[in-house]
Image (spheres, grey):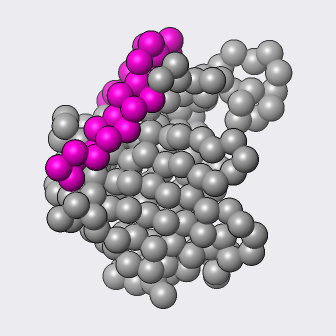
């Protein structure tokens, strides 16, 4: 288990998260801060609001404002099968965009991301790092992996989402998933 304790609160429309006894704090700090400067305008992720079809309808995503528009709630549902996930995106107490994600799998997982606008692209970096074997099922390898989500807005009706991993603390990135979102 990556966390000894996790507390997630939405207070007054601000997403607050707490991780305690984090043995990977130094590795995580490298992933989060390696040369990254973010703009965090309050409307940075407003383009997400609406109903979306993912990759020609393999999933449907609905994003709605919550808490007077200070937080966005994302509901992801597979069109075949019972898989569902939820995320909350909002400005955190440090003025960064933050996202927390949980799914309906038999062992729900929690992921935490922080970011904003990086080089004109809405980008969120994972704040918890995985041992490489957790992602790639390579027993015994001790590398740590950074992850990021990028949202390339095409127009008012579509955007391209990429999920990328880095094995070298953010020096280089490899695309693990690429999905096209189209407004329904």
- Comparing 44 with 76, the one in front is 76
Residue in the picture at 60% in, 41% down: 109
Residue 126 in view of the camera:
yes
Q: How many marks?
A: 0
In which quadrant is the N terminus drawn? top right
Residue 58 location, quadrant: bottom right
Residue 180 location, quadrant: bottom right
The region drawn magenta spans 6-35
Residue 120 in view of the camera:
no
Residue in the picture at 28% in, 68% down: 65
In the visual, does 3 lie left or right of 30? right
- Comparing 53 with 10, the one in front is 10
Relative to 85, is 108 above or below? above
Instruction: Point out residue 146 in the picture as x, y percentages from the top left corner.
Output: 53, 32
Residue in the picture at 75% in, 70% down: 81
Q: Is residue 13 magenta?
A: yes
Instruction: Point out residue 53 in the picture as x, y percentages from the top left corner.
Output: 55, 79
Relative to 127, is 182 above or below? below
Residue in the picture at 34% in, 71% down: 64
Question: Which residue is farthest bottom?
Answer: 184
In the visual, does 91 lie left or right of 56? left
Residue 7 location, quadrant: top left
Instruction: Point out residue 115 in the picture as x, y percentages from the top left corner.
Output: 32, 43
């Amino acid at each position: 288990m990556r966390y000894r304790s996790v507390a997630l609160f939405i207070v007054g429309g601000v997403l607050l998260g707490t991780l305690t006894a984090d043995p990977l704090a130094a590795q995580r700090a490298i992933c989060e801060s390696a040369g990254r400067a973010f703009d965090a305008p309050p409307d940075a992720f407003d383009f997400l609001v609406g109903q979306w079809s993912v990759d020609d309808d393999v999933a449907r995503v609905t994003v709605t404002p919550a808490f007077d528009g200070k937080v966005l709630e994302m509901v992801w549902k597979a069109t075949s099968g019972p898989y569902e996930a939820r995320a909350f995106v909002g400005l955190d107490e440090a003025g960064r965009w933050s996202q927390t994600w949980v799914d309906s799998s038999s062992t729900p997982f929690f992921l935490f991301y922080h970011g904003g606008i990086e080089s004109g692209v809405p980008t969120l970096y994972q704040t918890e790092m995985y041992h490489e074997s957790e992602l790639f099922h390579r027993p015994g390898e001790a590398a740590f992996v950074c992850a990021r989500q990028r949202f390339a807005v095409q127009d008012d009706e579509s955007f391209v989402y990429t999920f990328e991993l880095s094995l070298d603390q953010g020096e280089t990135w490899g695309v693990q998933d690429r999905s096209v979102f189209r407004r329904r």
